[in-house]
């Protein structure tokens, strides 16, 4: 497909998805999109979590859900979340599992060759749809990363693969897609001279830990000479990530 023929429209559509998400009713009925998204959120909290699991503290579930959505594309731990929201850590663990089971959000573990580290390291949380981020002051960079996370998460489930993030000190790889091959993925809304070294160093440091078959640097705008793949081109491909 020749994306250059419709580039401005494609970019605007991507910005709309970063801002408003992709629920059909929200896209088609933009005049009441906030009311629809609010209704979806209430359904998840009240019907899919509180009622389904027989919980008494609806306020705590709501606070936890809002906290996670506002923190999309960020690392979280159950202990720090417990202290911040003043909710017992065991309840945070249970409520988090219920919210994930109800498809409001999902968590990624940190990639590690140690089973213990895999379970105890901080997790990154992501909203399942960017529309749920509307009430919060979430940067465009985290919105874009969340959109890519949703795409990768769907493919990981469909292809029976694993999806992680990785970090070590100041180095980080946004996504590690582990199927037949290992693909390391970085996402940058704008790639410029300020951040290009950081993004590439993440790849370099991760390669020291494990054999990487493929590296993808996804960008909305690239202001450098470093090769990258346009996010809209990557998201438009409905194929095996190993082959993309």
Image (spheres, rainbow, N blue to C red):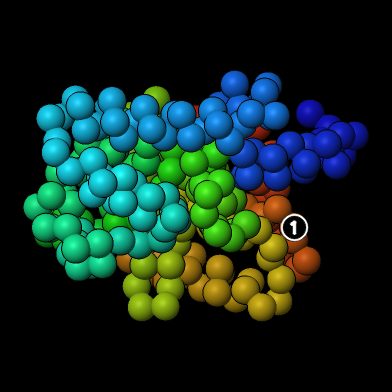
**Where is 84 relative to 14, above or below?**
below
Q: Which residue is drawn at 38% across and 32% down?
A: 42
Judged from the image, the secondary structure of the residue bearing numbered disc 1 is strand
Determine crowd level at label 1: few under 14, some 14-19, many 20+ residues with C-alpha closer than 10 A.
some
Q: Please provide percent x and percent y for residue 68.
A: 36, 52
Q: Quadrant of residue 217?
A: bottom right
Taking 173 as reference, is 85 left or right?
A: left
**Where is 39 relative to 8, above or below?**
above
Q: Quadrant of the C terminus?
A: top right
Looking at the image, the residue that sits furthest to the right is 5
Taking 26 as reference, is 56 left or right?
A: left
Q: Residue at x 64, y 29 (%)?
A: 32
**Where is 171 relative to 101, above or below?**
below
- In the image, 153 versus 24, the foreground residue is 24
Q: Quadrant of the N terminus?
A: top right
Taking 89 as reference, is 136 left or right?
A: right
Q: Please provide percent x and percent y for residue 30.
A: 69, 29
- In the image, 9 versus 221, the foreground residue is 9
Q: Residue at x 29, y 31 (%)?
A: 46
Taking 96 as reference, is 157 left or right?
A: right
- In the image, 59 versus 174, the foreground residue is 59
Q: Please provide percent x and percent y for residue 13.
A: 74, 37
Residue 108 can be seen in this image? no
**Where is 34 relative to 73, above or below?**
above
Residue tagged 1: 221
Residue 15 can be seen in this image? yes
Total number of numbered discs in the rendering: 1
Q: Please provide percent x and percent y for residue 66.
A: 38, 50
């Amino acid at each position: 497909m020749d994306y250059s023929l419709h580039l401005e429209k494609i970019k605007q559509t991507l910005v709309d998805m970063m801002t408003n998400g992709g629920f059909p009713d929200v896209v088609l009925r933009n005049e009441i999109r906030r009311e629809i998204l609010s209704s979806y959120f209430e359904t998840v909290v009240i019907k899919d979590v509180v009622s389904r699991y027989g919980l008494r503290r609806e306020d705590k579930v709501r606070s936890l859900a809002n906290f996670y959505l506002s923190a999309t594309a960020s690392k979280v731990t159950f202990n720090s979340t417990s202290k911040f929201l003043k909710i017992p850590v065991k309840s945070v663990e249970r409520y988090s599992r219920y919210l994930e089971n109800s498809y409001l959000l999902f968590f990624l573990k940190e990639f590690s060759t140690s089973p213990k580290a895999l379970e105890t390291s901080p997790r990154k949380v992501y909203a399942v749809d960017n529309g749920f981020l509307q009430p919060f002051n979430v940067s465009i960079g985290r919105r874009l990363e969340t959109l890519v996370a949703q795409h990768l998460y769907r493919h990981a489930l469909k292809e029976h693969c694993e999806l992680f993030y990785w970090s070590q000190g100041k180095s980080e790889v946004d996504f590690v897609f582990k199927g037949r091959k290992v693909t390391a993925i970085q996402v940058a809304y704008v790639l410029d001279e300020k951040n290009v070294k950081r993004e590439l160093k993440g790849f370099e440091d991760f390669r020291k830990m494990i054999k990487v078959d493929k590296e993808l640097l996804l960008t909305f705008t690239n202001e450098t000479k470093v090769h990258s793949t346009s996010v809209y081109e990557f998201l438009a491909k409905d194929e095996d990530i190993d082959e993309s």
